[in-house]
Amino acid sequence: MYAVIKTGGKQYRVKAGDLLVVEKLAGEPGAQVAFEEVLMLGEGEAVTVGAPLVAGAVVNATLIETRKGEKVKIFKKIRRQGYRRTRGHRQFESVLRVTAIGDGDARTETWDGVVDMTTKAELDARARNLKLPQFAEKAVSEAPVEETEVAAAAVVEAPKAKKAPAKKTATQDAGEA
């Protein structure tokens, strides 16, 4: 079963289990969001089109994170006048996991999976083997560290200084010639 919903002035075709990125919505991560502006429901060949909305239809989703989107550059120029202006903008966006689609009838489709609350920033940090401060608490609680490992990590030898090459003297220069 799929649905076409309207949010943030845009329309999205979703089904249960889809990951959806929309304009910023209010709420904390883990909050349940319900979209009641359902324009169309479909299941195979059977399609229900609203006029303008499908009565009683609702799409439920879980808010995973609110983040900034991709950077957009705005560049203005008037040729031969020396006028150039550069600006940038990053729009806020919300990431959602669609959990259920239902209408006023008995037809309802739910997603049985577990909603993973891992944010994109955390996934990027893991991919680069980085340890960011806000994710350090999770790493410490997941894997306890023994005291011997901490002590071994604390003792770090300083790198040895490199010697400068020997300077040439006047007698060495005369011997070469």
Image (cartoon, rainbow, N blue to C red):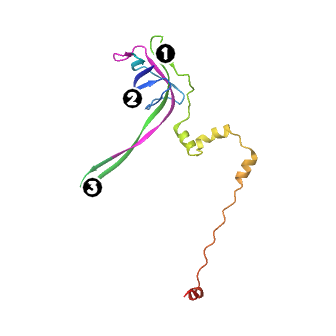
Image location of residue 94, percent across then percent down = 46, 32
Residue extending farthest left: 80
**Dot 2 surroundings within 10 Å: few (below 14), some, or many (20 or more)?**
few
Question: Residue drawn at (28%, 50%), measured in percent from left and top?
Answer: 77
Left/right of residue 80 with respect to residue 2 in the rendered view: left
- Earlier-in-chain disc, 2 versus 1: 2
Q: Nearer the viewer, mark 2 or mark 1?
A: 1
Magenta region includes residue 63: yes
Mark identifier at residue 82: 3
Place residue 58 in its image quadrant: top left
Which one is nearer the viewer's eye here, 151 or 87? 151
Left/right of residue 83 with respect to residue 118 in the rendered view: left
Residue under label 1, please give it: 108
Residue under label 2, please give it: 8
**Dot 1 surroundings within 10 Å: few (below 14), some, or many (20 or more)?**
some
Q: Quadrant of the C terminus?
A: bottom right
Q: Residue type at mark 1: give it.
A: Thr
Spatial CA distance of label 2 from label 1 is 25 Å
SS class of the residue under badge 1? strand
Q: Which residues are magenta?
A: 47-74
SS class of the residue under badge 3? loop
Q: Is residue 7 above or below residue 171?
A: above
Mark identifier at residue 135: none
Magenta region includes residue 21: no
Which one is nearer the viewer's eye here, 18 or 38? 18
Which one is nearer the viewer's eye here, 26 or 144? 144
SS class of the residue under badge 2? loop
Question: Residue drawn at (70%, 59%), measured in percent from left and top?
Answer: 157
- Earlier-in-chain disc, 1 versus 3: 3
